[in-house]
Amino acid sequence: MSAVLPNLRESLRRASVSGARPKLLIPVAGALLLLGLVASLAARRERPGEFLVRRGTLEPSVPLVGTLAPARSDSYGAVVPGVELKILALVEEGALVAARDRLIQFDPAPFQKELEVARARARELATEQDQARLSLAALRLKSSAEVRDARLSTETSERDLSALVNTGAPLTARESAHDVEQRERFLQESQEKLAGLEPFVEKGYISQEEFRAARSRRDQAAADLDLARARHAALVRQTNPDLIRRKLDENARDKAELRLLGERTRVSIEQAEAGVRLTAIRLEEASRQIAEAGKKIAWCTVTARAPGLAVHSDVFDRTGERRKVRIGDSVWGGTTVVTLPDLTRMTIQGRVPESEIHHLAPGEPVAVTLDAFPERKLTGLLRHIGSVGASEKNESRSFPVTILLDQNDSRFRPGMVARCSIRGASVPDALYIPVEVIHTDDRGSFTWVASSFGGAKARRIVVGKTTSRFAEVRQGLRAGERVRIAETESSD
């Protein structure tokens, strides 16, 4: 057929040049129309390895195979850091537990010993605190009495000093002065009597013995006056001043002793109060140790915070073999022993190839089928797309995704295989072709477009969104054209 059209074109050209009759053109035109119809029908028919360019709504759908996982999972184990605990009881793996059910029982013996030691220490410190308080009270009473006595002594000394200065010393000085005055009068009287007796002695009226007695009384009165004057001078100049100085020194000593006693009492009371506070601090520390040991004992009984399915953790035994944890094992603080996934809300964890990730966005619907329940058609919602990709064995990259399952069933278990189809945003009125007919080089994308008569030519195209089977063509093709998987020789 490819050889007919050139011959036909050449016959028409010759007829036009030679001026042939128009009636010959009618069969030729009919032949051309018939050939065009045949070529059009041939162009619309897909041959092996060829595909028609179609127009329609392109609905990206990304397949995914993942596994069921709980939306929330709680971990339980030994919470006391730095201590190795022995497991005395353990919930059976696979058991459905309710909130506040016991999951693990650790051996509380180490903490019970701590509790006993702390309680004994607390009792001892409580006794010490009582004794310290009693000693403080006794010290305060004793110190108060001593200070009171010292203050009374000081006040008495001050009163004695005041009495001596204001009353005693002036009174004794006046008494001494009065005695001097009396002695002076007595001397004067004695002298006057002696002078009055002298005329009578010469005349013989008074004997010489009486005269000598009168003279002796005068001499004695003079001596007594001298003595009284000396005593008065000593009293005024030395005795009273010495007494006042002694009283002043005594009063100063009493005041100093009062101050010293007050300071010594203050220091002693402060030391006793510090001892009381120290025993209180030690008792508080012992009480804290009691509470801490009590909490550790309470932590040895591990209960569920929420319902779920009990899953035992893996451990390595002494031979290096990996196995499930069991009763009798000892674990360190911070080690997870039981995981309790919440089966009331399940997710699907899987990975999507990098080439498909641009179709997806959180919130898109997902059709789900579980291998364990193939007859059930489930739905879900794309919840999260991971930001960090990972390399696969074939050097391609994939990204983790999380799908939230809408339905729930008590028979669903973590690890079940889920086959999903994530429906991306649709592209209405799109030209699309199979992805296998698209080729790329350093200049971009191209495809082989088949001609009406069997040949194919490379044509540059602009590719839009793609699915696992089809790709949107934004430029380079028209609806109805045929594209090939690979280049073939033309029959021209």
Image (cartoon, rainbow, N blue to C red):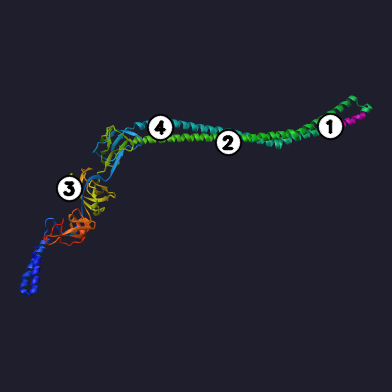
Cα–Cα gap, marks 2 and 1? 61 Å
- Label 4, label 3: how far apart the Cα atoms are: 61 Å
Return the x and y of residue 344 as percentages of the image width and height: 25, 45
Q: CA distance from mark 2 to mark 3?
A: 92 Å
Q: Which residue is mark 3?
A: 376
Q: For numbered disc 4, what is the local secondary structure? A: helix
Q: Are marks 1 and 3 in contact (CB under 8 Å)?
A: no
Between 35 and 456, the residue placed more toward the observer is 456
* Residue beneath the point at 52% across and 33% down: 137
Q: Position of residue 155 (x, y in %)?
A: 63, 36
Q: Earlier in the sequence, mark 2 or mark 1?
A: 1
Magenta stretch holds residue 199 = yes
Tell me which segment is drawn in magenta. 188-200
The first of marks 4 and 1 along the sequence is: 4
Label 1's element?
A: helix
Q: Earlier in the sequence, mark 4 or mark 3?
A: 4
Label of residue 187 in the image: 1
Q: Which residue is mark 2?
A: 263
